[in-house]
Image: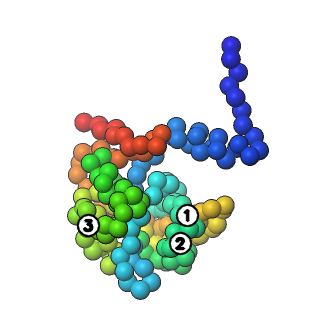
Amino acid sequence: MQETPKHQGDDLGTSMKLGMRRLASGVSVLSTRTDNGDRFAMTVSSVTSVSDNPASLLVCVNKQVALEGHLSTLGTPFAINILASEQRDISNLCAGFMGDEPRFSLGDWRQGRDSVPYLADAQATFFCESDQVTTYGTHHIVIARIVEVVLGELRVDPLVYVDGGYASIRRD
């Protein structure tokens, strides 16, 4: 029997990334208004529920993103839009992979609670306010209190990211 290679030290970060490619995650777009009122959207894959009482979620935002300081202000309103499988282009656009095209040029964007932009055609949208923020390594970890939930179609068909690409897990 062949032994599975283990990695330590300098290779640990690379091995961690390779291992995490095997963990499927839902794809979401975080949307908000900046301090000067401009709309902003970015693709995030590190979103998870924290608690249902109080209703809350956690999102990780890279410190290199211009918005990171904005979300660090407690009470900052934002939305987490859970993308549907057919919204790959929106994910790519909000991740910056489609060049200079404006991030709000695709999708059914509307203005919601606290003037926060949201995708009306998302699987679900969580309107949130940042409640706790901590920094770890390269990211800010934002724990947000959910203040409103908007559910999309009854059909559950989220966009999933795994092994460096998109997938679908449509359930009928």
**What residue is rendered at 39% in x and 58% in y?**
97
Q: Is the C-beta separation of discs 2 and 1 under 8 Å?
A: yes
| Residue named by callout 3 | 105
Q: Is mark 3 on a helix, strand or loop?
A: loop
Name the residue that disc number 1 marks: 62
Q: N-terminal of the two: label 2 or label 1?
A: 1
Badge 1 amino acid? Asn
Name the residue rendered at 38%, 43% in the picture: 166
Mark number displayed over residue 136: none
Give SS at disc 1.
strand
Q: Residue 72 versus residue 52: which sits nearer the camera?
A: 72
Mark 2 or 3, nearer chain start: 2
> Where in the figure is residue 20, as x and y percent of width and height?
56, 42
Residue to which mark 2 is pinned: 68
* Amino acid type at image mark 2: Glu
Check disc 3 and give the amino acid type: Ser
Q: Which coloring applies here?
A: rainbow
The N terminus - image quarter: top right
As measured in the structure, the alpha-carbon distance from the residue carrying label 2 to the one carrying label 1 is 7 Å
Q: How crowded is mark 3: few (under 14 residues within 10 Å), some or many (20 or more)?
A: few
